[in-house]
């Protein structure tokens, strides 16, 4: 998975300045990754710029592309045709309207999942938003758990062929999580802090911390961010 880890990398926001304001760009530039942030109006301008000789010298290699809802269908289309200029770029749709996001997943869930297009909610607090964005640009794949219910139903495992069935079973069994640990992991992966998880599950924060400690151990990861990445790679695939 591509990630923004180099100084000579660029994060491009494509869409309206009302959504991707100068403040948003400055915040991402300061808080998310050692990368240049810029905003463009449309795909034509972006692709033309990427083809130019001066792009990398001026901005660095493009590692993440974040588009607004008006450009989501266009992003899916570019992913489906495997646009070579975006082959190593993290593709992200900034989601403002939940109903639109549900419709997007209903229409394009297969493409969203197969091309690892992340859905970045814009209606969460800044700390959560930055956590999710950091995870995505570091190589993760994020879809709000509630939106995974909008995808077409998967076939039962008995209907899969042999190797696919084995892989599906492995993806489910390898974690060994209890139902409660699975609930905690799902909320953790949606960016919820321990206090909110505790309140919604009627647990103490201490108990939530114990669950997260066990989850991290069972998944073989080192922290909660890696646990969230594991969740979205294994439960949304």
Image (cartoon, helix red, strand yellow):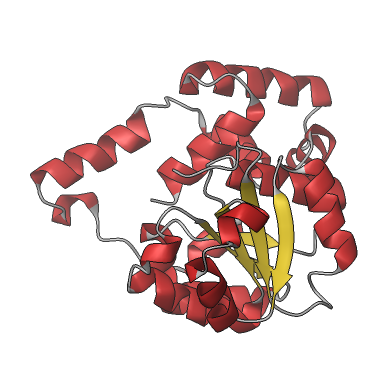
Q: Residue at x 73, y 63 (%)?
A: 38
Image side of residue 82 versus residue 69, left or right = left
Taking the image as shown, residue 97 lies to the left or right of residue 4, namely right
Identify the residue at horizontal 64%, vertical 78% (top origin): 69
User: How many numbered marks does the figure carry?
Assistant: 0
Look at the picture and state if 89 lies above or below 212.
below
What residue is rendered at 57% in x and 55% in y? 56
Q: Residue furthest left?
A: 162
Rendered image quadrant of residue 93: bottom right
Q: Considering depth in this image, is 20 or 11 the residue closer to the camera?
A: 11
Q: Is residue 43 visible?
A: yes
Q: Residue most toward the front?
A: 53
Q: Does the rendering let one see residue 143?
A: no
In the picture, measured across the screen, residue 59 lies left or right of residue 221, that is: right
Q: Nearer the viewer, residue 81 or 206?
A: 81
Task: From the top left corner, tell me how far across and down residue 123 is, in percent.
Answer: 80, 64
Q: Split into 4 quadrants, where in the image is the N terminus?
A: top left
Q: Is residue 101 above or below residue 236?
A: below
* Above or below: residue 21 compared with residue 146: below
Q: What residue is drawn where x is 73% and y is 69%?
A: 39
Name the spot of residue 9 as percent of width and height, x first: 61, 47
Q: Position of residue 68 (x, y in %)?
A: 67, 75
Residue 151 placed where, x, y %? Answer: 43, 68
Q: Which of the two residues, 212 or 200, is positioned nearer the viewer here?
A: 212
Quarter of the image for residue 163 reads: top left
């Amino acid at each position: 998975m591509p990630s923004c880890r180099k100084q000579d990398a660029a994060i491009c926001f494509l869409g309206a300045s009302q959504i991707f304001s100068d403040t948003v760009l400055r915040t991402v530039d300061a808080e998310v990754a050692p990368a240049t942030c810029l905003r463009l109006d449309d795909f034509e301008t972006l692709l033309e710029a990427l083809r130019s000789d001066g792009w990398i010298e001026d901005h660095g290699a493009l590692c993440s592309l974040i588009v607004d809802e008006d450009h989501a269908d266009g992003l899916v289309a570019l992913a489906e045709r495997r646009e070579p200029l975006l082959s190593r770029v993290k593709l992200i749709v900034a989601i403002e309207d939940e109903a639109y996001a549900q419709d997007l997943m209903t229409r394009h869930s297969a493409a969203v999942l197969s091309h690892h297009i992340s859905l970045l909610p814009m209606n969460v607090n800044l700390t959560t938003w930055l956590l999710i964005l950091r995870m995505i640009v570091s190589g993760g794949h994020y879809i709000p758990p509630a939106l995974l219910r909008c995808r077409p139903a998967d076939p039962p495992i008995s209907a899969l062929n042999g190797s696919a069935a084995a892989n599906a079973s492995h993806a489910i069994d390898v974690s060994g999580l209890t139902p409660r640990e699975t609930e905690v992991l799902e909320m953790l992966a949606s960016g919820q802090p321990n206090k909110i998880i505790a309140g919604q599950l009627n647990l103490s924060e201490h108990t939530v911390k114990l669950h997260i400690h066990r989850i991290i151990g069972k998944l073989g990861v080192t922290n909660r961010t890696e646990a969230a990445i594991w969740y979205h790679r294994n439960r949304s695939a």
